[in-house]
Structure formats: C-alpha cells, structure tokens
Image: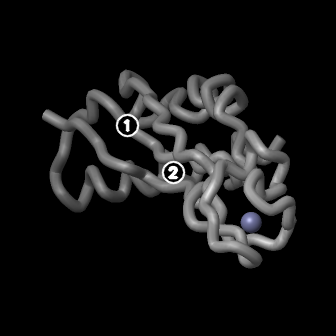
Amino acid sequence: MHELGIVIQIVKQMENYMDEHDIKRIDKLVLGVGELSGVVPKYLRDVYPIAVEESKLQNTKLELEITPGIGKCQACGFTYNLVQNDNICPKCGSNEFSIITGKEFMIQRIHAE
Ligand SMILES: [Zn+2]
C-alpha cells in the first residue's frame, strides 16, 4: 500500500504552501483521483488520519473527486469508459486505445480561511 507515502508527501507540500502564504488553517483539501491513477480512494481515506496526525492539516477534511478513466479507441475513434468496458471498445471490440482522462492524481483545490 503506497497510499500512505503519497499522502505524507501531499501533507508536506501543503504545509510548505501554508508557510509560504501565511495560511493558518485549511478547512478542506480536495484531491483529484483518476480511476486509472493506481491510487485507491478507500486506502487514501484510511491512511489520511495517520498522515495528518501532528501536522498542520490535523483538522483538515479530506474530499476526493474521482475522475473517470476515459479512453479513445484507436481503431474507430469512439470514446468510452475503460473501467466499465474492461478496456475493450464497446463499438468495434478493439483493445487499442489512448487514455484521455483518469491517470491524474493531484491537489484539486483547498478551502482555507
Ligand atoms: Zn472502437
């Protein structure tokens, strides 16, 4: 489970950001998690309380925004949900695709005082 390491990195990044911008407290941290990012939302929620312990984000709520894994078929150009279709184009049956969205994992936005 690499999620703890990821969240700890984010917490450090946020603490630096708070220092730089003289922000005392962040109410909510919104992370964008792509379905194809390899990061498991459930694990993120599980490890978050551990990662923020003793940090400036101790009282910050975590919110996740899941981006669907969308691909474009290279054979027929159809765009479809990769996860729901097991990476196979529902229109022509090809499994050649390029990823359009869903690989991203990032800090989407923060709500601060
Ligand atoms: Zn296709």
Q: Position of 93 compared to 11: left or right?
A: right
Residue situated in front as seen by the camera: 66 or 87 = 87
* Image side of residue 59 versus residue 70, left or right: left
Instruction: In the rendered view, tell whether residue 9 sits above or below residue 42.
Output: below
Residue placed under numbered mark 1 in the picture: 29
Q: Which mark is residue 10?
A: 2
Residue at 54%, 27% in the rendered image? 53
Q: Quadrant of residue 79?
A: bottom right
Q: Secondary structure at mark 2?
A: helix
Residue kind at label 2, given as amino acid type: Ile
Name the residue: 75% across, 45% down: 83
Residue at 76% across, 51% down: 90
Q: Quadrant of residue 40?
A: top right
- Residue 88 placed where, x, y %? 83, 56
- Residue 3 versus residue 17: which sits nearer the camera? 3
Q: Residue at x 29, y 42 (%)?
A: 110
- Local crowd size for mark 2, using a 10 Å CA cut-off: few (<14), some (14–19), many (≥20): some
- Asked if residue 40 lies left or right of residue 50, the reply is right
